[in-house]
Image: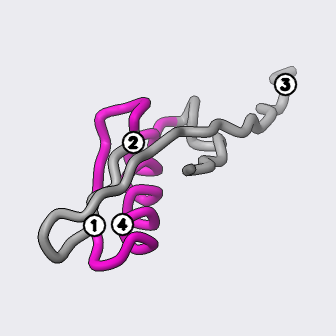
Amino acid sequence: MKQPCQMQETTLKSIVWQEGTYFVAQCLAVDVSSFGETRDEALHNLDEALALYFDDESVRELPLVIN
């Protein structure tokens, strides 16, 4: 019988900087970045981009914590 997959929390560090009128958020662990009109929007968009990046059966269940 197949064992249920246990969720693990993964913390990925990111940096945010302002470029013109936009904020850019970049993950330091993988080559994924995003942007937004505010710092919070850039981080939210990065979270979505990372979810798409890790959109794989083996890692889909990992909750992402972005610092």
Among numbered discs 2 and 4, the one appearing first in the sequence: 2
In the figure, is residue 26 to the left or right of 62?
left
**Farthest top residue?**
1
Mark number, residue 27 = 2
Q: Secondary structure at mark 1?
A: strand
| Between marks 1 and 2 in the image, the one whose residue lies nearer the viewer | 1
Instruction: Name the quarter where the N terminus is drawn.
Output: top right
In the figure, is residue 47 to the left or right of 36?
right
Q: Looking at the image, which residue is at 12% across and 70% down?
A: 20
Q: Residues within 10 Å of mark 4 (few under 14, many from 20)?
A: many
Q: Secondary structure at mark 2?
A: strand
Mark number, residue 3 = 3
Q: Looking at the image, which residue is at 74% across and 35% down?
A: 8
Q: Residues within 10 Å of mark 2 (few under 14, many from 20)?
A: many
What is the distance, in whole Å, between disc 1 and disc 2 at their CAs? 13 Å
What is the distance, in whole Å, between disc 3 and disc 4 at their CAs? 37 Å
Q: Secondary structure at mark 4?
A: helix
Q: Which residue is mark 1?
A: 23
Q: Position of residue 32 (x, y in %)?
A: 31, 42
Q: Position of residue 10 (x, y in %)?
A: 65, 36
The magenta stretch is 28-56
Q: Looking at the image, which residue is at 40% across and 74% down?
A: 41
Quarter of the figure with residue 19: bottom left
Mark number, residue 42 = 4
**Do the numbered discs 4 and 1 sit on residues whose CB atoms are within 8 Å?**
yes
| Between marks 3 and 2 in the image, the one whose residue lies nearer the viewer | 2
Q: Nearer the viewer, residue 19 or 3?
A: 19
In the figure, is residue 45 to the left or right of 61?
left
Q: Position of residue 23 (x, y in %)?
A: 27, 66
